[in-house]
C-alpha cells in the first residue's frame, strides 16, 4: 500500500471500528486486496481476519461479498457491522421474503457495503447471474479450510467455489482461515484457483490461551463436572462427541446449578437458535455441544473450552479451543482423552468412503493429535510446529510447561504388558489384562495361572498399568479390537513390538502423581493454579465496570443483540480504567468508533460521571 492508501485504511479502522492501528499481518493482507490481487491469509482465531476483507470492501468501489459456512456466524458478523455503522446484510435460508427483497433493493441502489452468503446459496445459478450484474469490490471466502479434503471440516460445496474465478474474473478474492497446514494451504490454492496468489501465514501462538490435557478416568464425565463447577459464573463451551452425550452432560451440569444447555444438529432449528442466542447474550452460560457448534461461535468472552471427548485432528483442536479468549483475556483449553477415543476415531475413518491416500493422511492426523495430547512437550509449541512454524520456544503457560511430567523408564513394564497380551492371545480386555499382571484374576484357569506373566506386575498399581496400556495403544504397540462394545487388547505393530522385546526401543511414560498430603483441587489445572482467571491485572474501577456491564446487558436485551457487539469486555475495562470525561476522550478508547460514540457515548459518559444514563 502507498502511504496515502495505508493512511486511508487506518482512518477507516479508527473511524469505523475504533482501533488505533493494525495488528500482525492485517496491513499487508489489506494492501494485497486493495491492489486488486487474490491472496490466502492464515491468521489466528481472534487475530482480526474479518478486518482484512471488511476494510477493502469499504474502500474499494462496489459490494463486498463474503462466503461463510454457517448462518450463526454470518448473523454475528452482520450484527457487529451494523453496530459499527456499516451497511451489511445476509441472505440465507432464514431470511424472510420481505428482508430478502429489501436487501436486493439496497444492493441495486449501491447502499450496501457487505453481503454475507453461504456457499450453497451463492452457487445457485440465479444468484450468480444476479450478482454478476453488480460491481463487486472483493470476494472473501471465510473458513477457507473447508475447501480442502485434507482439512478437518471439508465441505464439498466449498470445493465448487473455484468457479468464482471465472464468474468474477476482475474481482480480488481473499481466502481466510485460522487453521491450515502446508498441505491444506496448497489444496485451498488449487480448489479456489488462486494461482500465484501471495500467502500470508501468521504465528499460531495464542498467548492468552493456557492448554492442558488429562487422560480420562472412565467416561471422564465426573471430571468434566468438577472442572465446570470450578469455573462457575464464567461462560464456557464443553464439546462432547455425541448428541446423547451433550444432553446427558448438560442435564448433570444443570442439576449441579450451572446454567448449561445442549446444542447439536438433531435439535429443532428454532430451539438451536434460541439456545445459541441465550448463550451469546449470557455472562455465565455453559454450552455443551457437538462440533455442530464449532465455527458458529464468535463470542469473545468464552473463558474456557473443555473437550469431554477429543476432537478429530490438531486442526480441529486448534479451531475449537480457539473459541476461548477471543477478547485477548486469559482463557483455558482443557482436553480429556483416552485410548478408547483414539480407537473410535480410527474406526470411524474405516467406515468412511475415502481414497487410500486421504485415509492414510487422516489416520496420521489422528495419531498426531494423540501424540500431542499424551506427550510431555510444550503443547502450544507442538501445535505451532505442526503448522510449520520454525524457531518456536516453549510457551511457559501450558500444563507441561508449568508442571513438567516426570518421564520414567518403563521399558521392562512395557515388555511385561506386551508379553502378557501375546500369551493371552488377544482374548481379554484391559481390566482382565491388568488383573493378570497383578495376579488377581478370580478363579484363573490352570493355563493362565501357569503363564510366566501371571502376577509379574506387583511393582505398579492397577491404575498405573491401565495408564501404561493406554500409552502403548497410543504408540501403536497394542491395538484395541472393539468386539461389539467389549474391547479386547492385542499386539500392535509387529516390528515395533519386536524392537521393545529386544530392548532396541525404549518406552518412557508417566505414572500417576502421588501428592504428599493426598489432597487435590478437583477443578485445578496447572494453568489455573498459576493464574486464577481473567482480568487479574485489571486496575480499573470495579464498580464502574459492573455498572457498564449491567447497562450493556440491558441495551442488548432491548436490541435483541449479543452484548459483545455493543462493546467488548476489554473496551468496558478500558473505560473503567481511563474514566473518559468527554466524547473526545471516549473516542480514544479501543473499540469506540464514530457510530458507537454517537449512539452510546452519552449513556457511557453519564455512567462514568456517576449519573443515570439518558433513557433510564
Image: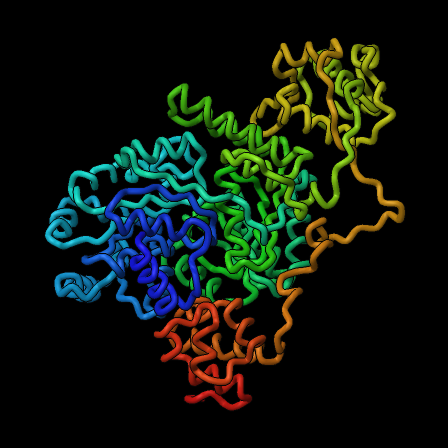
In percent of width and height, residue 29 lies at 36, 48
Q: Quadrant of the C terminus?
A: bottom left
Residue sitting at x 17%, y 42%: 169
Residue visible at 50% across and 33% down in the picture: 388
Q: Left of 350 or right of it: where is 196? A: left
Residue 181 can be seen in this image: yes
Residue lying furthest front in this view?
A: 3
Q: Report the colour scheme.
A: rainbow
The residue lying toward the viewer, choosing from 359 and 221, is: 359
Residue extending furthest right?
517
Residue 101's image quarter?
bottom left
Find residue 253 and report its horizontal and vertical position in percent.
61, 57
Residue 430: quadrant of the picture:
top right
Q: Quadrant of residue 488?
A: top right
Asked whether 613 or 476 is in front, the reply is: 613
Q: Residue 380, image x and y in percent? A: 60, 42
Q: Is residue 145 above or below residue 507?
A: below
Q: Residue at x 44, y 45 (%)?
A: 178
Residue 139 lies left or right of residue 598; in this view the side is left
Q: How many marks?
A: 0
Horizontally, residue 576 falls left or right of residue 130, namely right
- Looking at the image, residue 551 lies above or below residue 79: below
* Rendered residue at 74%/13% (across/down): 419
Is residue 248 visible in the rendered image? The answer is: no
Q: Position of residue 273 (x, y in %)?
A: 39, 60
Does residue 166 appear to the left or right of 450 in the view shown? Answer: left
Amino acid at each position: 500500500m502507498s502511504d496515502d492508501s495505508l493512511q486511508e485504511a487506518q482512518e477507516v479502522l479508527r473511524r469505523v471500528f475504533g482501533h488505533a492501528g493494525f495488528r500482525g499481518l492485517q496491513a499487508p493482507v489489506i494492501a494485497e486486496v486493495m491492489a486488486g490481487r487474490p491472496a490466502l491469509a492464515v491468521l489466528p482465531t481472534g487475530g482480526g481476519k474479518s478486518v482484512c476483507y471488511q476494510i477493502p470492501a469499504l474502500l474499494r468501489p462496489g459490494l463486498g461479498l463474503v462466503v461463510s459456512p454457517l448462518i450463526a456466524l454470518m448473523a454475528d458478523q452482520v450484527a457487529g457491522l451494523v453496530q459499527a455503522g456499516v451497511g451489511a446484510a445476509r441472505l440465507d435460508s432464514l431470511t424472510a421474503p420481505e428482508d430478502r427483497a429489501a436487501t436486493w433493493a439496497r444492493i441495486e441502489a449501491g447502499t450496501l457495503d457487505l453481503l454475507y452468503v453461504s456457499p450453497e446459496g451463492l452457487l445457485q445459478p440465479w444468484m450468480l447471474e444476479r450478482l454478476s450484474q453488480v460491481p463487486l469490490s472483493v470476494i472473501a471466502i471465510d473458513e477457507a479450510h473447508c475447501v480442502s479434503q485434507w482439512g478437518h471440516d471439508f465441505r464439498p460445496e466449498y470445493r465448487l467455489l473455484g468457479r468464482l474465478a471465472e464468474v468474477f474474473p476482475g474481482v480480488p478474492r481473499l481466502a481466510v482461515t485460522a487453521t491450515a497446514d502446508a498441505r491444506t494451504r496448497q489444496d485451498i490454492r488449487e480448489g479456489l484457483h488462486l494461482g500465484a496468489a501471495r500467502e500470508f501465514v501468521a504465528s499460531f501462538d495464542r498467548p492468552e490461551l493456557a492448554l492442558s490435557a488429562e487422560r480420562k478416568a472412565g467416561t471422564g464425565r465426573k471430571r468434566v463436572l468438577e472442572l465446570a463447577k470450578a469455573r462457575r459464573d464464567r461462560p464456557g463451551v464443553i464439546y462432547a462427541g455425541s448428541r446423547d452425550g451433550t444432553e446427558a452432560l448438560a442435564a448433570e451440569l444443570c442439576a449441579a446449578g450451572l446454567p448449561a444447555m445442549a446444542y447439536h444438529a438433531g435439535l429443532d432449528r428454532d430451539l438451536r437458535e434460541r439456545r445459541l442466542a441465550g448463550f451469546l447474550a449470557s455472562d455465565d452460560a455453559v454450552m455443551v455441544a457437538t462440533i455442530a457448534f464449532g465455527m458458529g461461535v464468535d463470542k469473545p468472552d468464552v473463558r474456557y473450552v473443555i473437550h469431554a471427548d477429543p476432537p478429530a485432528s490438531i486442526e480441529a483442536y486448534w479451531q475449537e479451543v480457539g473459541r476461548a479468549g477471543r477478547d485477548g483475556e486469559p482463557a483455558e483449553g482443557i482436553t480429556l482423552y483416552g485410548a478408547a477415543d483414539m480407537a473410535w476415531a480410527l474406526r470411524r475413518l474405516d467406515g468412511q468412503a475415502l481414497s487410500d491416500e486421504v485415509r492414510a493422511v487422516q489416520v496420521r492426523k489422528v495419531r498426531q493429535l494423540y501424540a500431542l495430547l499424551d506427550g510431555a512437550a510444550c503443547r502450544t509449541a507442538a501445535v505451532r510446529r505442526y503448522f510449520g512454524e520454525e524457531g518456536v520456544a516453549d510457551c511457559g503457560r501450558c500444563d507441561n510447561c508449568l508442571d513438567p511430567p516426570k518421564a520414567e523408564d518403563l521399558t521392562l513394564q512395557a515388555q511385561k504388558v506386551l508379553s502378557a497380551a501375546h500369551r493371552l492371545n488377544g482374548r481379554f480386555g484391559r481390566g482382565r489384562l491388568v488383573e493378570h499382571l497383578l495376579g488377581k484374576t478370580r478363579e484363573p484357569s490352570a493355563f493362565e495361572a501357569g503363564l510366566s506373566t501371571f502376577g509379574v506386575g506387583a511393582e505398579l498399581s492397577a491404575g498405573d498399568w491401565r495408564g501404561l496400556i493406554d500409552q502403548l495403544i497410543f504408540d501403536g504397540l497394542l491395538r484395541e479390537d472393539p468386539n461389539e462394545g467389549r474391547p479386547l487388547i492385542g499386539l500392535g505393530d509387529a516390528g515395533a513390538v519386536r524392537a521393545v522385546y529386544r530392548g532396541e526401543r525404549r518406552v518412557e511414560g508417566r505414572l500417576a502423581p502421588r501428592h504428599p498430603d493426598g489432597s487435590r483441587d478437583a477443578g485445578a489445572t496447572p494453568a489455573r493454579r498459576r493464574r486464577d482467571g481473567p482480568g487479574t491485572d485489571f486496575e480499573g474501577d470495579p464498580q464502574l465496570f459492573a455498572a457498564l456491564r449491567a447497562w450493556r446487558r440491558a441495551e442488548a436485551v432491548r436490541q435483541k443483540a449479543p452484548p459483545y457487539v455493543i462493546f467488548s469486555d476489554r473496551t468496558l475495562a478500558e473505560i473503567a480504567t481511563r474514566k473518559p470525561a468527554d466524547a473526545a476522550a471516549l473516542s480514544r478508547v479501543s473499540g469506540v468508533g464514530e457510530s458507537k460514540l454517537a449512539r452510546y457515548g452519552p449513556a457511557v459518559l453519564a455512567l462514568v460521571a456517576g449519573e443515570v444514563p439518558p433513557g433510564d
